[in-house]
Amino acid sequence: MSLETTPEETASMPVIPRDKIIVALDCSEQRALDLAQQLKGRASWLKVGMTLYYAAGPRIVQTLKEQGFKVFVDLKLHDIPHQARGAAQSVVAAGADMLTVHGSGGLPMLQAAQEGADEAFAQFAPTHESSAASVGEPLREKPITLAVTVLTSLDEATLQQVGVTRTLEQQVAALAQLAQKAGLTGVVASPREAETLRTLLGSKAAIVCPGVRPSGSAQGDQSRVSAPQEALRAGASYLVIGRPITDAPDPAAALEAIVAELS
Ligand code: C5P
């Protein structure tokens, strides 16, 4: 029997609130390591974005995984298919459990990135060595591949400047469907788009929502925010929460308060 869980199965599994929260570490390597220490045993997922990855390199992924975290490597890949395939391979080989590509890169790029992720998982994922029943089976789950549809920092006027004549909602829907066609697990989207996307993509797709603000926290530079419960009710599979946790005087307590709010 295969022990492997497909990303689709993982995305549709009932998970406890703690496992739905992804803490974004948009900071220096030292600060990220301090935060990981404080969140160890409490947070299930950490997100390594461009700021941290470009400063610390792929080793930060393994360092965080050795501390028991699942790691979302959010590099929003966008290049020719050959490069996207290679980059997805590198990111999965580094240990990513979740990764992002830009939906606007087009179908061949999305397909190449998915193939790269699959190839690296088959080649580099550690496998069981001791239990006779499962020798050779992967120890970790297949990585969740996500397409960024339209960045939450863009509005319709900005989209028109770069030649997009569809409405923002139409563009989000079109890119989400393209990602699904390419075989990706799901999308990154604003919580305000989650309900429409859940209907469009079905129950198995992963919908990962940033722009989440628990009650009482500052909005920061996010323009369209939702409360954690609202986002989950709308159909989000995972919530990405950064500064409300990482900038709190006690990040572990801030995370626990959100988990309690969701429970
Ligand atoms: O600190 P905050 O909770 O605003 O962090 C949100 C995280 O989600 C950041 O790491 C940001 O890069 C990411 N993100 C976002 N909007 C998107 C895609 C990703 O805020 N559309």
Image (cartoon, rainbow, N blue to C red):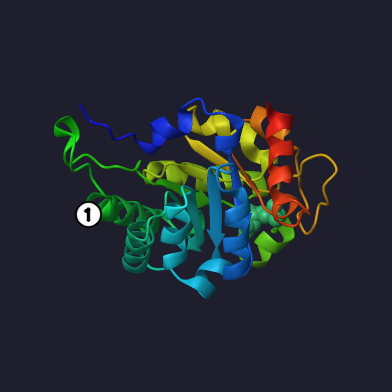
Give the percent coordinates (x, y) of residue 25. 61, 59
226 is higher (above) or lower (below) than 112: above
Give the percent coordinates (x, y) of residue 50. 55, 67
Residue 217 visible? The answer is yes
Q: Residue at x 82, y 39 (%)?
A: 215
- Is 147 positioned to the left or the right of 62 in the image? right
Q: Quadrant of ligand 1?
A: bottom right
Q: Residue at x 22, y 41 (%)?
A: 128
Instruction: Between residue 81 and residue 5, name the one nearer to us.
Output: 5
Q: Residues within 10 Å of mark 1 (few under 14, many from 20)?
A: few
Residue 237 visible? The answer is no
Q: Residue at x 46, y 47 (%)?
A: 68
Query: Which part of the image, by quadrant, shows the C terminus?
Result: top right
Quadrant of the image occupied by residue 207? top right
Q: Which residue is mark 1?
A: 123
Q: Residue furthest left?
A: 132
Give the percent coordinates (x, y) of residue 32. 59, 62
- Is 32 positioned to the left or the right of 56 in the image? right
- Is 64 positioned to the left or the right of 20 in the image? left
Instruction: Between residue 133 and residue 24, name the one nearer to us.
Output: 133
Q: Residue at x 47, y 35 (%)?
A: 205
Give the percent coordinates (x, y) of residue 218. 83, 51
Q: Identity of the amino acid at label 1?
A: Gln
Quadrant of the image occupied by residue 47? bottom right
Q: Residue furthest right?
A: 216
Query: Which part of the image, by quadrant, shows the N terminus?
Result: top left
Q: How many marks?
A: 1
